[in-house]
Every structure is written in C-alpha cells, then in structure tokens.
Image: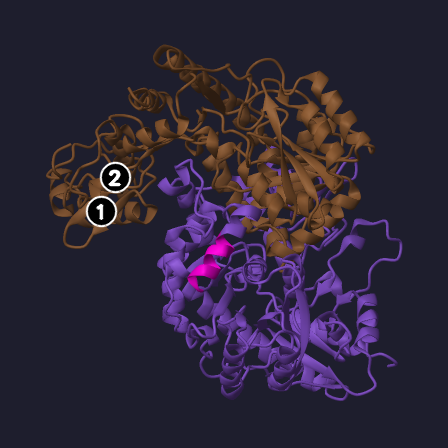
Chain colours: A brown, B purple
Amino acid sequence: MGKGATLAIEIKQDAREPVFLALSRAIIAEIERGRLKPGDPLPGTRALSKNLTLNRNTVDAAYHELTMQGWLVAEPSRGTFVAGDLPDFGRESALTEPADADGQNVRTHRQKLNISDGLPDARIAPTVPLGRAFRKALTSPPFLKSAYGDPRGCLILRKALSQYLKDERGLTLGADDMLIARGSQMALYLAASAIAEPGSAIAVETPGYPLAWAAFRAAGARVVGVPVDGGGISLKSLERIAEREDRLRAVYVTPHHQYPTAVTLGAGRRLRLLDLARRHRLTIIEDDYDHEYRFAGHPVLPLAARADRSAPVIYVGSLSKILAPGIRVGYAMAPPEVLRRMSDRREAVDRQGDVFLELALSELIADGTLRRHVRKARRVYLARRNHLAALLAKHLSHVSEFVLPAGGLAIWLRLNPGLSAEAWAVNAADLGLSLLPGVHFSLGPARAPEAFRLGFASLDESELAKAVRLIAKSVPGA
Amino acid sequence: MGKGATLAIEIKQDAREPVFLALSRAIIAEIERGRLKPGDPLPGTRALSKNLTLNRNTVDAAYHELTMQGWLVAEPSRGTFVAGDLPDFGRESALTEPADADGQNVRTHRQKLNISDGLPDARIAPTVPLGRAFRKALTSPPFLKSAYGDPRGCLILRKALSQYLKDERGLTLGADDMLIARGSQMALYLAASAIAEPGSAIAVETPGYPLAWAAFRAAGARVVGVPVDGGGISLKSLERIAEREDRLRAVYVTPHHQYPTAVTLGAGRRLRLLDLARRHRLTIIEDDYDHEYRFAGHPVLPLAARADRSAPVIYVGSLSKILAPGIRVGYAMAPPEVLRRMSDRREAVDRQGDVFLELALSELIADGTLRRHVRKARRVYLARRNHLAALLAKHLSHVSEFVLPAGGLAIWLRLNPGLSAEAWAVNAADLGLSLLPGVHFSLGPARAPEAFRLGFASLDESELAKAVRLIAKSVPGA
C-alpha cells in the first residue's frame, strides 16, 4: 500500500445495493486482508473517485459510512486513515514490526496483540441472524408492551434455555428454576448475595477466578482459598477449611474446566465434593462457563445434574462464551428459595434485563442458530487449540510444559523452575503482546504459579503463530 | 371477525419481499387495527391459502413467522390463535368487555390495562434506526475485537452522551466523569455502594421511589424518609434528620419532577438543599429520570449543573425513559473518586455493558435520531397529558383533584377526603385495570397519601379514555 495516492481495489457490484456500499465492503475487505493496515492513509476522495471512475459523492458516502462504523477515522485537515484500534486481522499486520518511535503518527495507535483468558472470537459470531433477530424483537409484542418485565428474565428465554440445558447437559430443572442475568458475573454476585450474610465465607479455588472473588466480596462475603492440584480442587484442604470455618456457607468451583488450569474434576472428586458439601451444609456454586467447548469425548455432566436437596447447587453459565464478549447474557439455576432471593436482589441492583436481547436470543435457540454456531465454533476452536499446542511444543518445550486440555478455550502453560512468569510478561508487553501470568489468578498468601493462561479461541492461526513467536522472544534472561 | 373460517385481508405485495412476509405484515395490521383480537382463532392454512389463492406453504411460513414473533400462538390439534398476551392496540379491543367467565378459553388471557408509573410508549420508539444501528454495531471493529471492555461503558458512548448532556442540560462534565450502567436502577445501586458503608444512612423522599430504597438497602445503607409537600422535599425535616443522624451520608432527590408527585423543586429550595448538603457534608444523589419531558417553559437545570466540590452531586439519568422500558441504559456522573469506586463495584457485579448496544446508542445520538425522537415523543406525550387531564377534569373532579404537571410522564391524582386509594385500586383491578395507589410510594410509618400516580405516556388517547372510564366505575362505595 502506497502513501495514500492510490488504492487498487476491486468493487464487486450488485445491482440491488448502492455503489457506496459496494465500495465500503471492498475497503473493509482490504483492511481484513491486511493490505490496508491500522493507521494507513486513504487516498483523497477526489483522487479515488477519478481512479475508480466513480462519482465523488459516492466515495464520500463510503468514507462516511466506514467512519461511522469505526473502520476509518477522519483527521481534520490531514485526511482519512484506517482506524488505529482495529482488531488484528492477522495477515501482514503491523504487529510484526515494533511500534514507531516518534509516538506522534496515528500508526502508533496500532493494535496490541492480547492473549485473552479464554474469550471466544466475535469474528465468527452469527451476527447476521443475530441482527435479524434484534430487528424482529424490536417490533414484537413483548417489546412493544410498555411495562416492566420479570427480574428473572423473559419467560420465553428461560423456557428455551432450560430446554437447551436439559437436552445438552442433563439439567432437569425448568424455566421457573432459572434466572437470566447480565452475564455470569452478575449471576455469581446474585448467588453470593442470596446465601451469604456479611462476614460469612465462601471457599474458592486458588489459582482461580479473581472476578468471582470480587463478586463475592461485593456481596459482603469473605473468600477463603483452597489449593488446586493436577486433579482440580483439593478436597483434603477444603475439608480442613470447612472444619475450621464455622461461617463457611458455600464453595465455588469450576469443575468442567478449572479456571485457570483447565483441569477437569474427575468422577471420584465430584462424588467426594457432593458428600463434603452435604456433611458441612455448604451450597456449591458451580461455574460451568464454557461447557460447550469439549474436544475429547463427551462433556462431563454438571454437578448440578446429580445434586439433590441435601447438597444444593447454584449452577451458573453464560451465553457470552458462545457468542461474543460484547453480548452479556448469563444465567443461574438454583433451588426455589435461593432463586427468589437472587431475583429480589437482581431487581434492587438492575431491575431487569434488556427485553429485546432476551427475545432475540430465545429466537436463536429456538431456530437452531445457537446449536449450529456451537458446532462450528467447536470445530474452529479445536483447530486453534491443536495449532497452539503444536507451536508451543515446537518453540517453547525447552522452557515450559503443558497438558493438552480436553476442553475449554485456554492452555495452561507451566514454566520451567527458575523462570518468572511476571518478568516474562513484562518482556512480552514491551514487544506489544499482553500475557496473563499466574499471579493474576492467585489468592492471598498462596504462592503464585509460574505459568500463563493462554486463551487460543479469539486468535486465528496466524495470530497464534505471531503470539508464540513473541512469547519465545520474551523468555526472561534469554 | 368470524370464527376463523375466513379472513378478509389485503396483501400489499412488494416485488422485493417474499409473499409470506407481505402476508405476515397484513395479519399484523389486522391485529393492530383490532379486527383480530387476542385469542381469536385464525383460519386453517388450507382454507386461507385457497381463499387468497396463495400456496399453502406461503401461509404456513407466514403463520410460523408470526408465531416466532409472538403475534400468534399455535395450539396443537386446536389451531392457530392471536396471542393472548398482546398489548392493547386500543381500537375495538377486548378490554371494553369483561373477561369470559369460564376461564378455559385462550380469550381469558386477554391483556389487562396497566396504568404505569410513567413509562414511555415503546410503540413510538425509533425501532427502525435502532435495528439498523444494531446491525452496524455487530460488524464494527470494537464489537469484533474479542476483549473485555471498560466497566464504565464504551468511550464512544460516554463521549456522545456527555456532549448531549452538555448541550441539553448544561452539565459540563466529560466522558471521564461518566459511567454507563444498565439502567438508572444500577446507577443508583452503584452510587450508594460508593458512598455508604454498612449501617450508614441515606435520606429519601416520602412519598418516593421504592426501587431506589431497594437499591440503597442492597448496598448496605439504611433509608430515612423525609416528607414531601406541595413544593417538593421538606428541607426543615431534612435539616432535623441531618442533625440527628450522624451517619447520614447522602440525600436522594428527584428535583425535576418529584417521584411520585410530579412537583418541580423551586429555585429557593434548590439553593437551600445545596447549602444544607454542604454544611452536613452530604452527597446529593440527583435522579433526573425524565428530564426531556418538560411541557411548560424550559427544563430546569439540574442541581449537578451548579454544584461544586463542597456539595458533591451524583447525577443519575436514563435512556430507557426516552426509548423503551425494554432497552436498559442509564448513566451516572460523579466526582472522580466516587466514580472510581462505582466503576470497581460495577466490574464486580456486572463486569461491563453490552458493547453492541452501547455502540448503537452512540450512533443514534451522533446522527440525531435520539434528539428527533425526543422532540416527537414530547409532542405525543404532551397531547396525552392534556387528554388525560381533560378526562380527569370531566369525569373525576367530584371525587379528586390534581395539579397539571409542568413535566414528567405522570399525573398525581389526589382523592377527596374519606376515599381510600387502596380500596379504589382493588375495585379497578376487578374490572381489569391496574392502578398504583399512594401506599406503593410510602416509606415506613409515614401515612400513605390517598392518591394515584397515573402514567399517561404509554397509553394512546383511546386507551386513556378507557382507563378513565374504568377508574370512574371503580369509585369505592359508588
């Protein structure tokens, strides 16, 4: 790409759509292909219109459209540029070279590469059916009815989702046992609010999920760490804590794919956990945040599918992990009295959800879009997991090791003795790569594991290759 | 409309759209016109296809589409019916006749008429531009970037909204002083969490807004009632409470249109309130929930527009009152340290908002749709206010009185001495009309006002006429 003088572009014209939209799509394609990079200048509208023999208004309209959509930025008296904060589309991206030194150029806004903690890739989300479902929801009777809704969420979504969970996860609870929350984050806060009084305690895994601890603390509870080993949460430690802490109310676990280590809790420990909860009258808060993503064998049935009244389980899940981080819908299933308290608290802090969003999602479940997308995403993410595993084995086996996870969207990479994950992450940040070291997942005095959680789902294969290259370049002391 | 044997319908066919969609739209029009009523049976697909000389699959597809959208319900082996839970479209509606006695028929699901506490009418919401903005947002870079967002909300929306508030309300704070929350409900909860420790107190108006009290209690605060008179909150009472309560941290007020009485706090009391807050080191939580709806003169500038550091104000507003109750977006503006604590709490209980929704709303603000809609809504609601006021004067002046409110979306109807608002509301409920009596807005031992809050914005003129007819029929002892 030259310095904005010209732009060799092929417009695929379709008689049913305005020319400016065809031009917009062609420019987006150039950006996605990496031929136009973040910060690149675009040709002036006069030059481009001449070049493509288009009306200048058409080019103006396309630039305006793309600016509104955030693909381009217009800088007064300087011209139009590709936006600096675009996600990395992976091909020929600015990422391979270090940032400009002058710090003045818009190029310096270029995207950093983030290794997430296990986010899905919004670029493969079913945005077209979703957009259609939104449009329908906005003209549907439940939306047009001007009234407040149920703080537990629309009945139609609770019905569709509880049926989905019955089919896919063996959960026999129904729509009345379910609350739709903003995301699993809110579901965790509501769960803790329903079972903890100020000063009571909730046992949590460490390393574990810091935002769950924040949710529990916001509900007034203390959190007490329970170590995790290669088999998941240590039940011996939990037993000791339950004996010592007489205000322990609940234990928070991620049994399907432990966060952050990705270990699956085995059948033996599951039974012992249920038994322990029964004996100590603990509620189990089961966070099954990425149930769908199981690559080896079948998903393991949730604890909630085999719990009974003597060991109550609050089961928490999320649709955000299926669709995109920017669509926040989670849910909880709980015994009636707990659910009632969660619903009251939800009304007090948030009243109710977005009706149009809940309606649209129930439609995507009912018409099969969600199931189809899960199948597609599982295929894509399996390939990404395998790709990352192969890269790690090839480029980093001399300094680290990992167990290939049977499911989930992240690999837990343990560093060889003597290597500091924090120092390594600092080096990587200098190269423009953001990494999550073990200290990020550690509670209180427990020693932080020297490890990284590497979310692979939101990066495509070339982005993963770049990431591993940058990780390998950042080995501390190398 | 006969018993489902036939359906005289006119299909406006447009070559660019499938026939089943044209048929769907025609059926929706019949429902909206009131010729098809909730619970009415539709003709069988075979009969209708013959009648309209359409392919039966086309009729099947239209019925399926409308069932998915919630307009129709399919009852196995009985046929297809107009959904029973549709909003009242006002014309020839089932509402004018009492419900069937047998309770078995789907007709018994017919919509009740709800007088809201002051909700906007989603039927006039700009759903087309909104749908378009959603579609754009779902393919825009900030949405496709798979990463967590800012718990204060997308910067682009904070920028657009703070500019809007500067232009419309004289608030000079910027995007960094703002937090986008799910609705004003969450903003109120976060505000209280940021300023109250367990056991500290917040003074609130009574009669007042019960869900604000629930939000403050969820944050661990006690609420203390301050009486409201014909001029708004009583500052004498507030002064006494501030002197007595050494753990009083804040006072919650609705100065623009007091909730529920609709009174505007005058200039004198505003100055005295700011002074009182300064002397007693109270934070003012100002809930300006329906600022836009001012019918007489100009809106009064918020307290937040004239506050200084010595009397901090947390300013809370909502876009839900502008658009629709089923779109939940509110916001708060606050001093930096308070905003930081609110942001931390927001992350703990809800992490962040829906990125696509925040992007879409920023677009509607930027392209002028929101402003245009506000102007249109103000015109429509002014007509409805006047219509309700005329009806009340004509049919209910022998048993009640009211002051025409200068703004807001509700009239506060005070009953003549000796009449019980609760008994009246019970009678009205028997006729299918839901009313909000004064007790609903009363805190603790304060005597409940014998009054109704009558939200007029969500009902059209014929619905308002029906409502007043039913209210007049329900006079207790009449």
Q: Residues within 10 Å of mark 2 (few under 14, many from 20)?
A: many
Q: Nearer the viewer, residue B358 or B106?
A: B358
Secondary-structure class at tag 1:
helix
The reply to whether residue B248 is in sight is yes
Q: In the shown orientation, is residue B431 left or right of residue A93?
A: right
Q: Chain of mark 2?
A: A
Residue B322 in the image: state x and y as whole percent. 51, 64
Q: Residue at x 58, y 25 (%)?
A: A258
Q: Which residue is mark 1?
A: A58
In whole angstroms, how far apart are the C-alphas of marks 2 and 1?
Answer: 8 Å
Residue at 54% from the left image edge and 51% from the top image edge: B345
The amino acid beneath tag 2 is Leu
Does the segment drawn in magenta span residue B108?
no
Q: Residue at x 50, y 36 (%)?
A: A129
CB-based contact (under 8 Å), mark 2 and mark 1: yes
Image vertical order of residue B255 relative to residue A301, above or below: below
The quadrant in which residue B122 appears is bottom right
- Viewer-proximal residue among B406 and B150: B150
Identify which amino acid the numbered label 1 is placed on. Answer: Thr
Q: Position of residue A431 (x, y in %)?
A: 27, 30
The x, y position of residue A303, in whole percent, is 71, 26
Q: Is residue B46 above or below residue B453?
A: above
Q: Over which residues does the magenta segment extend?
A: B335-343
Tell which subunit mark 1 falls on. Answer: A
Across and down, in percent, residue B47 comes to 69, 39
For the C terminus of chain B, give its image quadrant. bottom right
How many numbered badges does the structure rendering display?
Answer: 2
The label shown at residue A23 is 2
